[in-house]
Amino acid sequence: MYFVTFVMTPAPSKRSKPKPAYKRVLLKLSGEAMAGDNEHRIDEKVVQSIARAVYGVQKTGVEVALVIGGGNIYRGADGERMGMDRVSSDYMGMLATLINALALQNALEKLGAHTRVQSAIEMSKVAEPYIRRKALRHLEKGRIVIFAGGTGNPYFTTDTAAALRAIEIGADVILKATNVDGIYSADPKKDSTAKKFKNLTYIDAINRHLKVMDTTALSLCMDNKLPIVVFDMHHPENIQKVIFGESIGTTVRN
């Protein structure tokens, strides 16, 4: 009688893919980020780089919304300093954000992304009006939603618009892309002794006047316990790093 022994060899282990730290995010981009090194214009290469980074995040399964400033084209506060009526000047700044939103939408769709631009100022020829339920539905269907037109009201910044929209859509975090790698005690380009913060509370950011976001935006985030991560946009891969929980830049929370 012969006995046959079967040796069970374990199947090769597969490394589990890292899971994103967030389900839904709102990315806040300044208008200056769209200009690159060129003032008062849109740099096509920079926009394409941003689009690739954003689309890469969306392809991981994370729902992505964006708010873009318009400072590379027109800033409402600048118009007021030149003697223009503040309300009219702010509306001009809101229209500038729509130009940037359309430029980014074009770059994203060339990559194969599905997008929607929603504007707080009604402009039906080029964008949907902002409707919260529609925005949520777009996100659930895997579309990237770009919010333009600020809040639709003068005297409010696009930082406040970002905080408001993030809260309305139930985002897990605001990712604020800037020209520096976090929040410092002073401008690191002017003060070599400036200290970088890894973590901050909302109250510290407000009391220290650190200009992370304006006071209205910070107060909204604080009241709704919405964290903010500030990081350097010059390295587009930083968005992916933040999404997967890597500690970069500065985190603001309670």
Image (cartoon, helix red, strand yellow):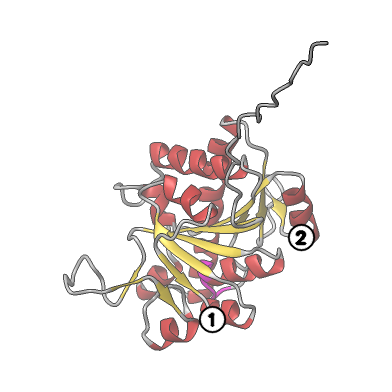
Report the mark closest to the observer, 1 or 2: 1
Residue stretch rendered in magenta on the structure: 154-159
Number of residue marks: 2
Q: Residue furthest left?
A: 192
- Kind of element beneath mark 1: loop
- Kind of element beneath mark 2: loop
Q: Residue at x 42, y 37 (%)?
A: 44
Which one is nearer the viewer's eye here, 64 or 79? 64
Rendered position, 106 above or below 175: above
Q: Residue at x 76, y 56 (%)?
A: 136
Per the image, is 7 magenta? Answer: no
Q: Residue at x 42, y 74 (%)?
A: 199
Which one is nearer the viewer's eye here, 123 or 131? 131
Q: Residue furthest top?
A: 1
Q: Main secondary structure of the magenta part?
A: loop
Which three-letter amino acid code belongs to the residue tagged 1? Asn
Q: Does label 1 or label 2 sit earlier along the sequence?
A: 2
Location of residue 141 in the rendering, given as x and y in whole percent from the top left corner: 76, 45
Residue bearing the label numbered 2: 131
Q: 7 left or right of 191?
A: right
Q: Residue at x 67, y 54 (%)?
A: 118
**Quadrant in the picture for the C terminus:** bottom right
Q: 34 left or right of 126?
A: left
Residue bearing the label numbered 1: 254
Q: 219 left or right of 10?
A: left
Residue 67 appears in the picture as rendered: yes
Location of residue 156 in the rendering, given as x and y in whole percent from the top left corner: 54, 74
